[in-house]
Image (tube, rainbow, N blue to C red):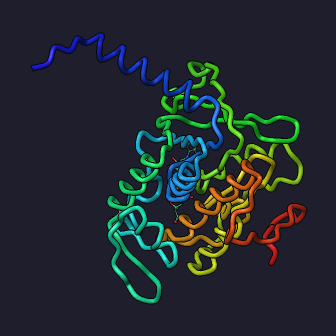
C-alpha cells in the first residue's frame, strides 16, 4: 500500500517539469520542430552525437504522418538504405523486393520515438511553435505557446507566448513548411513555399534529401518541409527519404555547431533563391 497525497503528486509534476524545462529545454543546441519521420530521426541523431536536443510537437502524440501508411492502412514502406535506420531502432522489416521494405506503422512510430528518448531527446508535446526568434542575421530560437491555447478564439488568445533559445532550429513541420513560410515574409531571398508537386516516388525520395539544407543561418529545412518549400514532387506513402533527410539535417546541425565536417553527408542540390516559381535547379 502506498501513502501518496494528492499534493505530493502535483508538486512532483510541477517540480519535475520546471526543472527539466530550465535545465534541458530553455537553452539548447538544437530545436527540432515536428516529430514526424524526419523530425524524430533528426532529433535522435542530434542527441546521439551529444547535442542538447529538444523536439517540439503541437499534437499530444508524436509521430506525425507515420501512424498510417497509405489509405488509412497501418503498413509503412521505406526504400534502401533507409531500412538501416529502422533496423537500428529495432523495427522488424519485411523485404518486399527491389529495395523496398515494409513494417507495421505503430511499431515504427513507437520504436523511433523510444530510440529518440533513449538518445536523450527532450520532447515538448501539445506545444505549437508560432514563430522564430529572428535576429539581424540569424535564427536564435523559437517562440512557443500551448497548442490548446493557440486554438482558442482570438479574443481569448491575446496571451503572449514565451521564447526558448537554440543554436540551430530544424524545420520538420511537413507540408506546412511553417518556419520557412514565416521567414519568407521577413527576409528577401527566402522562397514562399508553394507546396509539393504531384506524385513521383523515386524522384521525390531523392529530392527531399537533396533539398534538406541550411536555408538561413541557424535554420535547416528538412524532409517534407524542404519538398514543399521548392515545389518538388510528393512521394506518397513511402518514408525512406524522410528518414534520410532527418539524418542529413542532424549531420548539418552537428557540422554547424561543432565546426567539424561530417564524412559521407548527403550532397545538397544547387538552389537558386532568385527564380520566382520553380526554385529547384540541377
Ligand atoms: O507531416 P510530418 O510527418 O512531416 P515529415 O516528418 O514527414 C512527411 C511524411 O509524414 C508524409 C509523406 C510521406 O513520407 O508525405 O507527409 O516531413 O510531421 C510534421 C509534424 O510537425 C508538426 C505536425 O503536427 C506533425 O506532427 N507541426 C507542424 N507545424 C508545427 C508542428 C508547429 N508550428 N509547431 C509544432 N509542431
| Number of marks drawn | 0
Say which quadrant the N terminus sits in: top left
Whether residue 253 sits left or right of residue 59 in the image: it is right
Q: Which residue is drawn at 63% across and 24% down?
A: 162
Q: Residue at x 55, y 50 (%)?
A: 43
**Percent of width and height locating residue 52:** 59, 41
Say which quadrant the C terminus sits in: bottom right
Residue at the outermost left position: 1
Quadrant of the image occupied by residue 70: bottom left
The front one of 261 and 109 is 261
Q: Can residue 73 be seen in this view?
A: no
As drawn, 268 above or below 126? below
Q: Residue at x 47, y 35 (%)?
A: 126
Q: Is residue 13 visible?
A: yes
Whether residue 184 sits left or right of residue 237 in the image: it is right
Quadrant of the image occupied by residue 271: bottom right
Whether residue 45 sits left or right of residue 115 in the image: it is right
Q: Residue at x 89, y 49 (%)?
A: 188
The front one of 235 and 54 is 54
**Percent of width and height locating residue 262:** 69, 63
**Percent of width and height locating residue 68:** 38, 62
**Percent of width and height locating residue 260:** 74, 57
Amino acid at each position: 500500500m502506498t501513502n501518496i497525497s494528492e499534493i505530493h503528486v502535483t508538486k512532483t509534476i510541477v517540480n519535475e517539469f520546471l526543472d527539466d524545462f530550465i535545465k534541458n529545454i530553455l537553452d539548447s543546441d538544437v530545436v527540432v520542430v515536428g516529430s514526424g519521420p524526419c523530425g524524430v530521426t533528426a532529433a535522435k541523431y542530434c542527441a546521439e552525437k551529444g547535442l542538447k536536443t529538444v523536439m517540439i510537437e503541437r499534437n499530444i502524440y508524436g509521430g506525425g504522418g507515420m501512424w498510417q501508411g497509405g489509405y488509412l492502412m497501418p503498413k509503412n514502406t521505406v526504400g534502401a538504405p533507409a531500412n538501416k535506420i529502422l533496423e537500428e531502432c529495432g523495427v522488424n522489416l519485411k523485404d518486399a523486393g527491389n529495395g523496398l521494405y515494409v513494417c507495421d506503422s505503430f511499431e515504427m512510430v513507437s520504436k523511433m520515438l523510444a530510440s529518440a528518448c533513449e538518445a536523450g531527446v527532450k520532447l515538448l508535446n501539445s506545444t505549437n511553435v508560432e514563430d522564430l526568434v529572428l535576429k539581424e542575421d540569424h535564427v536564435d530560437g523559437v517562440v512557443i505557446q500551448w497548442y490548446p491555447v493557440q486554438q482558442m478564439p482570438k479574443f481569448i488568445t491575446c496571451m503572449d507566448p514565451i521564447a526558448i533559445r537554440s543554436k540551430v532550429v530544424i524545420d520538420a513541420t511537413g507540408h506546412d513548411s511553417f518556419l520557412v513560410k514565416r521567414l519568407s515574409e521577413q527576409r528577401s531571398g527566402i522562397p514562399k513555399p508553394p507546396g509539393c508537386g504531384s506524385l513521383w516516388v523515386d524522384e521525390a525520395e531523392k529530392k527531399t534529401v537533396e533539398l534538406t539544407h541550411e536555408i538561413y543561418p541557424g535554420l535547416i529545412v528538412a524532409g517534407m518541409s524542404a519538398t514543399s518549400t521548392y515545389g518538388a514532387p510528393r512521394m506518397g506513402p513511402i518514408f525512406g527519404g524522410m528518414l534520410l533527410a532527418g539524418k542529413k539535417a542532424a549531420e548539418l546541425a552537428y557540422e554547424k555547431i561543432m565546426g567539424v565536417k561530417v564524412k559521407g553527408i548527403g550532397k545538397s542540390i544547387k538552389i537558386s533563391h532568385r527564380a520566382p516559381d520553380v526554385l529547384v535547379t540541377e
